[in-house]
Image (tube, rainbow, N blue to C red):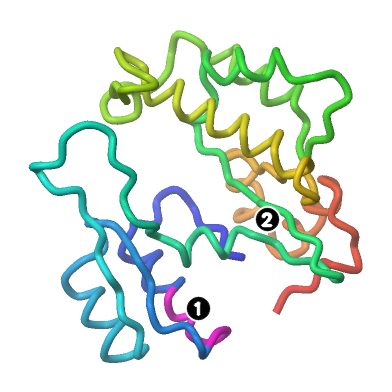
Amino acid sequence: MAVTTANMGHHETATSLRTRLRELHQDIYLARTDGRHTGPLINQAREKLALTAEVVKRTDDTKGFVVPPRREVAERTLSRLTHPRHVRQYLEVDEKQHFTGARALTLEHYPAGVKLGFDASQWLARSQALTGREPGGGFGLPKPPLFPGDGGRHRQRAFRDALADLLPPVHGWLPTIRISDTEVTAITSAPDAVSSLSALLHERGVPASYLVFG
């Protein structure tokens, strides 16, 4: 699992993650990524890590809604926790753009008694506090066909986060753990970041015996 600060760029993050991926998994030879990770990163992956980095792009002549091939699989895989007896659990870090009016709306409609890996009341309170102050630009672009109009990306993100919260337990996974951007800042600023992260994960429901870092 890799948790980075928000000021760590895509290239720096990709280099670190791919190096760690090669150390842990000698059998992986292909990683799909998007157009942000090109040029020197592709060459480095091939020459130093024996890893083929395949860039997946949406072409200009694509019309309508088309699902591109899977990409950034390595990054997503590193946010999945596999516990003893193959019990699995997702861990997601929510940056500020995840706390919006749309997210507040989804949280308000969660079923009573639903099992979650975070304090929904805290997420709801912050989402309500930031309602009307959502980031603009690319963070709020229209996302047709399901989320057209201004703020479409905010609604799409809230919908996706709700699915990530509600569906895993239905399929036998543990509840998704969420860590906010402010919590990441506190963890990385702590004298012992590993112990700080371990304590937070234990608080979110991960048994202490599973928390072995190395």
Check residue 133 for magenta coloring. no
Classify mark 1: residues with Cα within 10 Å, few (<14), some (14-19) or many (20+).
Answer: some
Q: Compared with residue 102, is residue 120 higher up or lower down, i.e. above or below?
A: below
Residue at 31 percent of width and 21 percent of height: 136
Q: Position of residue 117 (x, y in %)?
A: 78, 41
Disc 1 on helix, strand or loop? helix
Q: Is residue 193 shown left or right of residue 139?
A: right
Q: Compared with residue 196, is residue 18 higher up or lower down, i.e. above or below?
A: below
Compare residues 19 and 54 and report the one nearer the observer: 54
Q: Position of residue 183 (x, y in %)?
A: 65, 42
Q: Which segment did they paint magenta? A: 18-25
Q: Position of residue 133 (x, y in %)?
A: 43, 13
Majority SS type along the magenta span: helix
* Kind of residue at disc 2: Ala
Disc 2 on helix, strand or loop? loop
Residue at 20 percent of width and 66 percent of height: 38
The number of callouts visible is 2
| Disc assigned to residue 190 | 2
